[in-house]
Amino acid sequence: MDFIKTTGVLNEVLSERERQEKLHGVDPKHTPETWLMILGEEVGEVNKAALETRFGVEGASWEQYRHELVQVAAVAVAMIESFDRQYQAAVANEFLGIEAYP
């Protein structure tokens, strides 16, 4: 594994997460199902970029494909962050005897 390249990619994902937080807020409290729909939409953008580039659609590029991959990774990170926050809140609420939000 080339750790220098990996670190660079992870820094791009972090920058995209920061952009997403500015756009959507820190904790939108999505359900897992909602997160899957968001992730699916992003994966669809990757598919679209790859196919359009492969078949020579004007304006399509492998750079756009890569950009969309970074967005997929950032959404996956957001999903994990959201799950961790919600899980910790649910555990705390259970400990305190308070019903957690769905």
Image: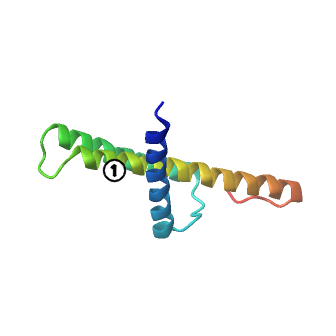
> In the drawing, does residue 37 fall left or right of residue 102?
left
Q: Which residue is drawn at 57% across and 57% down?
A: 30
State the residue lying farthest toward the front.
Answer: 4
Q: Is residue 54 visible?
A: yes
Q: Which of 16 and 24 is in front in this view?
A: 16
> In the drawing, does residue 51 fall left or right of residue 74?
left
Quadrant for residue 53, please give it. top left
- Colour pattern: rainbow
State the residue lying farthest toward the right.
Answer: 96
Q: On screen, 2 above or below 81?
A: above
Name the spot of residue 67 as percent of width and height, x first: 33, 50
Q: Which residue is drawn at 12% across and 42% down?
A: 56
Q: Can residue 37 be seen in this view?
A: no
Q: Residue at x 54, y 53 (%)?
A: 78
Name the spot of residue 48 as percent of width and height, x first: 26, 45
The residue pinned by badge 1 equals: 67
Q: Is mark 1 on a helix, strand or loop?
A: helix
Three-letter amino acid code of the residue under disc 1: His
Q: Nearer the viewer, residue 43 or 7?
A: 7
Label count reads 1
Name the spot of residue 64 as percent of width and height, x first: 27, 50
Crowd band around label 1 with a 10 angstrom C-alpha radius: few (<14), some (14–19), many (20+): some
Q: Which of 10 and 90 is in front in this view?
A: 10
Name the spot of residue 36 as percent of width and height, x first: 49, 47
Q: On screen, 70 above or below 27?
A: above
> In the drawing, does residue 25 fall left or right of residue 50?
right
Quadrant of the frame with the C terminus:
bottom right
> In the drawing, does residue 70 fall left or right of residue 62?
right
